[in-house]
Each structure stands twice: as C-alpha cells, then as structure tokens.
C-alpha cells in the first residue's frame, strides 16, 4: 500500500524521497520529467502537481488548545493547559513557551499547570478565546470515549476506508456531537494518531474540533506509526518524527515534567547513533497517571522496555492505591496488542496488565484494573470485562473483524463499569470474509445530537 500510494502521489522522490520513504519504495517511484521539481514542496502542492487532489483540509495559524488532567501526584484539582500555534502565546497560565524541538518545528508549544474547582465550571481566557473546563468531582461517575488508530488521509499510509466512511468529516462530527453534552467528561486516542510524519494531518483534524471538544479532558499515548511512519524500526527513514512531534503536539502531563520543561528533550533524534531508528525520547515523556471522576488511568509507550518503566508503574500504583476509595475503575492505556513493530517483547498492553499483578503496590487496585489498546484494526472485546480493542477507525484488517467503524463509550456512572459500542458502519471486509455491510452513522449521530450519547445506549452494543 505504501508503494502504491508513494508512486501515485509522488510526494517526494529522488534524493529527497529517502528522507521520507524506505529506499525500496523510492526506487520504484516514477514521476514525469515535467513534475520533477517537487521534492521540497508540500504534500498538497505535490498532489496537485501530479493531478491527484489532496483532500486534507489546511489550517492557517489559529491556536489549538489542549486540556489534560495533570499527573495524579500534582493533586486532583490540577490540569495542564496547552496551546499549539505558529507562535508562542503570552498568558500567565504558561510556564513554558517554546518552538517545537527536533520535529514539527513550524509549531510552538505554550503550556502550564492550573488549578480548577472540581464539580464546577472553571473559565480561562487564552489569546482572546474563552476556555470552559469542567472536571467532575473526585469519585463521581464518568463517561468517556476511547479510540485508537484513526485515519482520514493516505498521504503516508493507506487509509482504506477514508472515503467509504468519510473519515475526516464523520470522525470530527461524531466526536464533536458527543462532547457537546455534559454527560461525557473525557476522550482519548491510543496511538497511530492520523499516521502523520510531518504534523499537517494532525493539525488539520484538530482544527475541526469544537471548543467543547477541546475543553474536555484529553489523553493520548503513542503507537508505532507515531515513531516510524512506515510502521517499524526496520523501515526507519530520517524524517520520521520518532515520537518527538507527538509528545509536544498532544500536550500530555507526564512523569517527565519539571519546573522548567514539560518534557525531557535530552535525546536528539538526529544525534550520531549506531541505530538511529531507536534514538527515541525517554519513556518518561509518554508515561502518565491521573484520574477523572471515579476513573483512573495509566498511559505508557510500548516502544520502550518494560523494565525501564517498572519504577513508573510502581509510582502509579502507589498513587492509585492511596486513592482507591475514590477509584472504581483503573484503565491501562497503551497501543500495541502484541510485540513487534517496535514494541518491546514485555510491553504489549495485555502483557503489562499481567506484569502489574506482580507489583505489590498494585495489589490494592488490581481488581479494578482493565485495559484498552489498538494496533490491530478491530473493535472488540479481547478479554471479557477486562480487555478491549478499539483500533477500527478507518484502517483495514484482514481478519473477520476488519472493515468496522464504531465508537466505544466507557460508562462508570451508578457504580458500574460498562462499555457501550456504537457500530457506526461496516465496510467490505478486505480479507475475504462474508461480513454484511451496513451504515448506521446518520441514525446514531442524529440520536446523539438530540439526546447526548448516554441517551442513545439503545443503539449500542454492550461489551
């Protein structure tokens, strides 16, 4: 698929090509001689030049707001507010203001921690925009959306169902409709976020979010394509972001944060190394633990060795156990469902789930622990009442579960843990399985717009 798309779009070639694509792909690209002045131009310009329109929307210079829960160790009333823009933004909120380092350097990050009053709406003004934040009271029931592997463009990797499901418009429309109501408190993306090497696709998608969506608590963990756009270290190319663009763009409050910087920038991805494909930022830049209402979260990067993160997991469990009386569900958030494609052998999500049972500090909350993951492009229960896969958001899978598109909603209200899966559509299964196709998108969207997602559970499947 990468070869076909690279040849079709001609986004880079000749000496510039090998910075973006594996050499074997570049050798096969055939570009007409009159289109040869493309290698330093944008993907949009390149697509137009070879007669293939790029339908990726553009965004011009507006500020892009992130609101995430602060690390649990900071206290329940803390949030991190960030702005991604084409300049630094002046505000007393921001303790750090800087151009992105190493990758996606046309962007700037302004970020800082702020206090809110749980259970009440807290308002801030940033660059003339009002941001209204609602953090539920600690221990109160919550609802949230958890997704993985979303795509809408085939600029780098083939997004098979981009047109079938109208992924750019529909993915934004459904998230914005859900977040328009106060019955949902958070939403998350668990890696392979838009399959984006250069940051344009990510900016375009986030520009389509409403202020209500951007004000809800957001979390993200990286997947293999967030480090190596072609999927794995063996397909590394020099322009790969290696997780650097990701960690700054998504504005998470992580264990790496200090008083002077939100992230640890020690590892330069372009420094001399025996294996530049593995020249990754510290695992601490992706590790977080926090709480929204009665639901706590532990997020991590599977591209890093489990042994290097044991102290972080121990700290997270120590914190969760100390707050166990307010936590009804503890969700482990990661990307990989199995090792390979850059994932350490001990770092897939189901494996980490098992490993945590051996950490004494996790024992008091072990019964509350569940996990969510992506990587495989399916939406399904992988372990009854415990493990959930949420990776069918436009990408394909050759197994029987492939071709699905749907939204999982986690509900921990009324002392329960339930996952409601909204089957938005089913496309043709590319693996040859005879799976009936359907399209429930309009019906489900209409109900959510009228009643909020919790008023539409009759259209969902209870996982």
Image (cartoon, grey):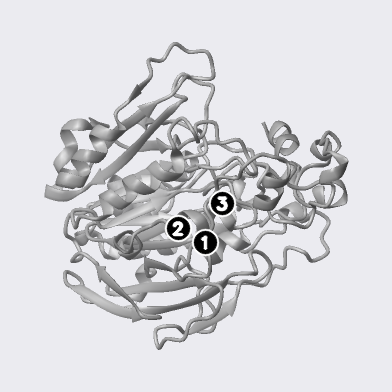
Instruction: Please identify, in this view, whether the residue under mark 3 or under mark 1 is nearer the observer.
Output: 1
- Judge whether 172 appears above or below 243 on screen: above
* Tally of numbered tags: 3
Residue 306's disc is 3
Q: Is residue 419 visible?
A: no
| Residue in the image at 61% along x and 41% along y | 345
Which label belongs to residue 59? 1
- Of callouts 3 and 2, the N-terminal one: 2
Image quadrant in which the N terminus is located: top right
Label 2 with label 1: CB-CB less than 8 Å: yes
Question: Horizontal placement of 306 versus 121: left or right?
Answer: right
User: Which mark is nearer the camera, 3 or 2?
Assistant: 2
Residue placed under numbered mark 2 in the picture:
206
Where's the C terminus, which quadrant?
top left
Q: Secondary structure at mark 2?
A: helix
Residue 416 percent location from the top left of the image: 17, 44
Residue 235 lies, with reference to residue 143, above or below; the image says above
Question: Mark 3 touching mark 1, by CB under 8 A?
Answer: no
Going by the picture, which residue comes out furthest to the left? 414
């Amino acid at each position: 698929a990468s070869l076909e798309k690279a040849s079709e779009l001609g986004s880079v070639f000749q000496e510039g090509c090998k910075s973006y694509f594996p050499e074997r792909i570049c050798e096969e690209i055939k570009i007409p001689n009159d289109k040869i002045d493309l290698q330093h131009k944008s993907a949009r310009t390149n697509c137009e030049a070879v007669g293939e329109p790029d339908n990726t929307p553009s965004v011009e210079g507006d500020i892009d707001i992130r609101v995430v829960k602060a690390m649990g160790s900071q206290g329940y009333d803390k949030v991190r507010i960030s702005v991604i823009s084409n300049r630094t933004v002046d505000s007393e909120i921001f303790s750090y203001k800087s151009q992105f380092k190493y990758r996606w350097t046309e962007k700037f990050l302004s970020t800082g921690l702020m206090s809110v009053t749980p259970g009440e709406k807290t308002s801030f003004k940033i660059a003339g925009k009002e941001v209204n934040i609602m953090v539920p009271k600690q221990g109160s029931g919550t609802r949230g959306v958890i997704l993985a592997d979303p795509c809408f463009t085939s600029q780098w990797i083939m997004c098979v169902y981009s047109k079938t499901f109208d992924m750019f418009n529909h993915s934004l429309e459904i998230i914005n409709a859900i977040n328009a109501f106060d019955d949902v408190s958070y939403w998350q993306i668990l890696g392979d976020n838009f399959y984006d090497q250069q940051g344009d696709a990510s900016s375009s998608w986030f520009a389509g979010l409403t202020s209500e969506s951007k004000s809800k608590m957001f979390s993200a963990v990286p997947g293999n394509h967030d480090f190596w756009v072609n999927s794995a270290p063996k397909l590394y190319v020099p322009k790969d972001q290696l997780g650097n663009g990701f960690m700054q763009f998504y504005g998470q409050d992580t264990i790496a944060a200090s008083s002077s910087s939100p992230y640890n920038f020690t590892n330069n991805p372009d420094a001399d190394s025996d294996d530049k494909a593995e020249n990754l930022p510290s695992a601490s830049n992706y590790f977080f633990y926090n709480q929204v209402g009665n639901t706590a979260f532990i997020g991590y990067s599977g591209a890093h060795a489990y042994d290097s993160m044991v102290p972080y997991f121990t700290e997270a469990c120590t914190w969760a156990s100390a707050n166990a009386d307010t936590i009804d569900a503890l969700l482990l958030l990661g990307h990989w469902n199995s090792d390979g494609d850059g994932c350490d052998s001990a770092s897939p999500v189901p494996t980490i789930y098992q490993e945590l049972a051996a950490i004494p500090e996790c024992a008091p909350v072990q019964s509350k622990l569940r996990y969510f993951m992506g990587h495989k492009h399916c939406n399904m229960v992988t372990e009854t009442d415990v493990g959930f896969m949420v990776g069918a958001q436009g990408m394909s899978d050759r197994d029987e579960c492939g071709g699905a598109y749907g939204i999982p909603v986690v509900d921990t209200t009324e002392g329960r843990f339930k996952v409601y899966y909204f089957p938005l559509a089913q496309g043709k299964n590319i693996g040859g399985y005879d799976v009936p196709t359907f399209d429930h998108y309009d019906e489900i969207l209409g109900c959510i717009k009228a009643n909020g997602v919790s008023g539409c559970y009759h259209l969902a499947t209870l996982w």
